[in-house]
């Protein structure tokens, strides 16, 4: 039995922890992220085609699941070496599970609910218990075992939601809440207690780079939607104007993320002693909000470019207002996690964008006006030096 376990889950596939503060992001990790290019496209299209409060809640639930699956996989690659055979095989299996989830997204609340649940729950259980086996006999092995038990608990609700269509959304929201509460509960298990945060021996710079890359992928969805719409449409003046607006909105989010916090975040992860605390709050949670906001902004850009001269409808207005605010909320939380102040300029969009949205709703102008309203708020927020006048 021991020999079989040594072959299936060899401890030799773990990364070396004493080779400096930064771990290399491997090509296998980048290959895994290709699935998330497709996943983010599916999520944005789900919201595009379900522009109701129920559709938004469904999309948010699906996003929460696919983000958590990506997040936990990125964490696991902080310990297991994807360039070794066992680590590579694990990443490829998880990639196949993630692809199942992505394929199911469009009909996840319909006839493909089982495919989505199979992908998500399999991914969670395989990852947690395989990592526990690889690190058997250590505190980290125990940590992953307890994480796996929380995945079992949430899995009960994922499966129940697939079984009971009338309660699917409610049960899946409970499952998401269990998954997201696990880290802050220390993955408490009866008879074992909590997993001490300091025993999760992270290399934070690796996780920061992984999160930066997935944020770039989220911005890439905006580029894909923008470019795809331009390819299919007549290249006239209104289209070029709205495309320019969309492009500058994407640049604004990139600027807010990389120019405002890029160096500071790297410095924080180089010097912070409590890497796990920083990574949990700043990466697992705050980055999830930022990526979600970027996806909503992508949908807003597509709506504006697709209907530049038509009066903006209420769902498009709500999406256009909500996307930047969701992104800025995550960005502000990330800054606070890094110990930075939140500039006063970051608060302006929370006051001005809803007013612009209301004005557009009342006056019924075209999508161009809505896009310009977003841009005149987001671009100055990005260009103002965040070191000035902070709260």
Image (cartoon, rainbow, N blue to C red):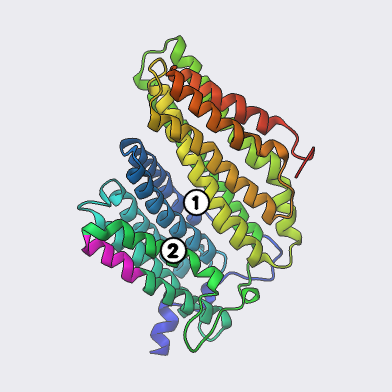
Q: Nearer the viewer, residue 308 or 55?
A: 55
Position of the C terminus by quadrant: top right
Q: Main secondary structure of the magenta part?
A: helix
Give, as a single range, the part of the protein colored magenta: 155-164
Q: Is residue 186 magenta?
A: no
Q: Is residue 156 magenta?
A: yes
Most distant residue in the front direction: 362
Which is nearer the N-term, disc 2 or disc 1? 1
Q: Nearer the viewer, residue 360 or 95?
A: 360
In the rendered image, which residue does mark 2 sit on? 177
Circle 1 residues within 10 Å: few <14, some 14–19, many ≥20: few
Against 178, residue 30 (above or below) is above
Most distant residue in the left direction: 111
Q: Secondary structure at mark 1?
A: helix
The reply to whether residue 25 is visible in this rendering is no
Against 290, residue 158 (above or below) is below
Most distant residue in the top direction: 237
Q: Residue at x 44, y 63 (%)?
A: 177
Percent coordinates x, y for residue 52 in the rendering: 34, 39
Q: Nearer the viewer, residue 39 or 149?
A: 149
The numbered disc on residue 30 is: 1
Please give left or right for residue 80 compared with residue 103 in the image.
right
Percent coordinates x, y for residue 203 in the rendering: 65, 64
Q: Nearer the viewer, residue 382 or 350?
A: 350
Percent coordinates x, y for residue 375 in the rendering: 57, 25
Please give left or right for residue 3 compared with residue 107 in the image.
right
């Amino acid at each position: 039995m021991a020999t079989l376990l040594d072959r299936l889950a060899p401890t030799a596939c773990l990364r070396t922890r004493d080779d400096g503060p930064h771990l290399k992001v491997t090509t296998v990790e980048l290959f895994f992220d290709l699935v998330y290019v497709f996943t983010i496209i599916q999520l944005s299209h789900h919201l595009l085609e379900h522009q109701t409060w129920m559709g938004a809640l469904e999309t948010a639930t699906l996003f929460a699941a696919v983000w958590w699956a990506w997040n936990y996989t990125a964490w696991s690659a902080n310990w297991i070496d994807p360039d070794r055979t066992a680590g590579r095989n694990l990443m490829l299996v998880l990639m196949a599970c993630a692809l199942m989830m992505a394929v199911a997204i469009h009909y996840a609340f319909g006839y493909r609910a089982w495919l989505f649940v199979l992908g998500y729950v399999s991914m969670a259980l395989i990852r947690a218990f395989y990592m526990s086996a690889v690190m058997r006999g250590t505190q980290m092995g125990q940590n992953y075992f307890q994480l796996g038990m929380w995945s079992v608990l949430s899995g009960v609700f994922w499966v129940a939601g697939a079984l009971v269509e009338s309660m699917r959304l409610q049960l899946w929201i409970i499952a998401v809440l269990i998954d997201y509460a696990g880290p802050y509960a220390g993955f408490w298990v009866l008879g074992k207690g909590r997993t001490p945060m300091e025993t999760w021996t992270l290399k934070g710079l690796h996780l920061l780079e992984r999160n930066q890359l997935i944020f770039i992928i989220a911005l890439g969805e905006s580029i894909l939607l923008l470019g795809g719409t331009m390819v299919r449409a007549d290249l006239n003046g209104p289209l070029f104007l709205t495309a320019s607006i969309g492009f500058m909105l994407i640049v604004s989010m990139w600027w807010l993320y990389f120019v405002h916090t890029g160096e500071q975040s790297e410095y924080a992860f180089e010097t912070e002693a409590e890497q796990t605390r920083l990574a949990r709050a700043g990466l697992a949670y705050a980055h999830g909000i930022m990526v979600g906001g970027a996806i909503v902004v992508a949908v807003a850009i597509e709506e504006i470019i697709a209907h530049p001269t038509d009066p903006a409808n209420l769902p498009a207005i709500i999406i256009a207002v909500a996307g930047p605010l969701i992104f800025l909320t995550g960005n502000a939380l990330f800054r606070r996690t890094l110990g930075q102040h939140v500039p006063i300029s970051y608060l302006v969009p929370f006051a001005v964008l809803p007013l612009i949205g209301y004005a557009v709703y009342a006056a019924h102008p075209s999508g161009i006006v809505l896009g310009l309203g977003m841009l005149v708020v987001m671009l100055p927020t990005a260009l103002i030096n965040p070191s000035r006048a902070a709260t």
